[in-house]
Image: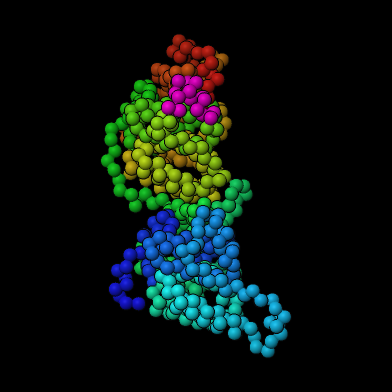
Amino acid sequence: MSASNTTLPPALTGIAGLDDVLNGGLTPHRMYLIEGTPGTGKTTLGLGFLLAGATVGETGLYITLAETEVELRAVAATHDWTLDALNLFEMVPADGLGEDQEQTLLHPSEVELGETVRDVMAKVDEVRPSRVVLDSLSELRLLAQSPIRYRRQILALKHFFSTRRCTVLFLDDRSGSGSDLQLHSIAHGVVSLEQTLSGFGAQRRRLHVVKMRGVRYRGGYHDFEIERGGLRVYPRLVASDHAAQDAGSTVSTGSTELDALLGGGLAPGTATLLTGPAGVGKTTATVQSVIAALKRGEKAAYFLFDERLPTLLTRSAALGMDLRPYIDDGHLELRSVDPAEMSPGEFAGAIRETVDRGAGFVVIDSLNAYLQSMPNEQFLVLQMHEMLTYLGQKGVVSLLILGLHGVMGDIRSDVDLSYLSDSVIQLRYFEAYGEVRQAISVIKTRTARHERTIREFQIGSDGLQVGEPLRHFQGVLTGVPTFSGEGKTLMASRIGSSASRG
């Protein structure tokens, strides 16, 4: 291949996320290996690659050694594709089980391998395609029967395609024993597709680029899904790839007293973690902050893991914080997430999309359910670090809810994310004069000198109401805060407030 070919634009794969991972696409006129076990999406990727070329006027040839043309068209139909613009070359022998092939003095593989390779070359010379997909190499490996003959045939095909100016994808289902390192060394690039099953929920698919010569690709695992219309790849979020934006001044939470606790309010580009036991008011405090942002004309995104969406809407409306008008006018994107069905990469991609659409407020409710979608806690912390760094560089106000186990005494969380947060708001129950009450305090903020007092709060028909600082507490740091002051310093009890929960 001449040096001038290096100036050609990249060959788009037809998958926006994969092109992003590959920093633009594939280098034209090279041979690539797409490997993965059956069901990982190799055929769908190959067809999409050829169809992407057809949209820009490139001739595509799909050579199938295993599947029939009818099967390929059936796969395409599930994605609403038509393959009329492609050349399909079916090399599945219809008489492979004939009696005349059962007895022979010459081993059939020696003849069939040479004939198969010659037929492939003849078809390429006939069609003269720009893009070729060969499905699959496992058939050639079985015909070769020895690594030496197999390598020689692949090298011959590589040389042949390079002289025909073709961009070629070889599909391999890994039917051989272990990884085919010989093929890895021959191919210009290798993309590996994987599929795993968890104890519950849908299967998880991910890919990684094993090698790609001459391309600064994004390493690591990238989640993907097979959807109607082809593969959808969610590139791994790397915060350093996104330029930082100037953060504005602090914004209000909708409560003057809570703003005072935070030292002025919520700072753009920061993450605030709200922790507390079940029902203490975390979600209500968060919704109030979101409502305040929406009233200022900002856009917000709310990712709901724990609660049913209708329940949140009904409960918020009963507290004087109706979210429906903001959903209808497009300022609020409220999305219910099933962690058993959504991969972490897809979730990170959804957050990026909402930020690209102008969301300045992002809520994750809650991290406990998000944790269940991760392989282990270490991965959760690493992904949350990248996500929060990205949101911070974009100047987004992030609100994270973390539920704690227990109500009184030894309260603990599944994972400690406090060090990733710029501010931590702690909501707790306390007892005073035979009643269970709620208290709020700010443990830390990195952006201001926050108030170090403990304030009582109540939830009623007008939302979250924060009272004056309470001084007479005992056992706050032990986890069992007990009020020992005079009753007149407490907020007046309101009928029905204790029924509200967050």
Q: Position of residue 99 (x, y in %)?
A: 72, 80
Q: Position of residue 82 (x, y in %)?
A: 50, 59
- Asked which quadrant contains residue 259, the reply is top left
Q: Position of residue 271 (x, y in %)?
A: 39, 37
Please give the name of the residue rendered at 32% of the width and 40% of the height, measured from the top-left corner. Answer: 395
Instruction: Pick the residue in front: 92 or 205.
Output: 92
Please give the name of the residue rendered at 53% of the width and 71% of the height, measured from the top-left corner. Answer: 89
Q: Position of residue 164 (x, y in %)?
A: 40, 77
Residue most toward the bottom? 105
Q: Is residue 220 visible?
A: yes
Visual colour scheme? rainbow
Quadrant placement of the N terminus: bottom left
Q: Is residue 38 above or below residue 162?
A: above
Instruction: Pick the residue in front: 6 or 488.
Output: 6
Within the magenta stretch, is there residue 322? yes
- Asked which quadrant contains residue 327, the reply is top left
Residue most toward the front? 84
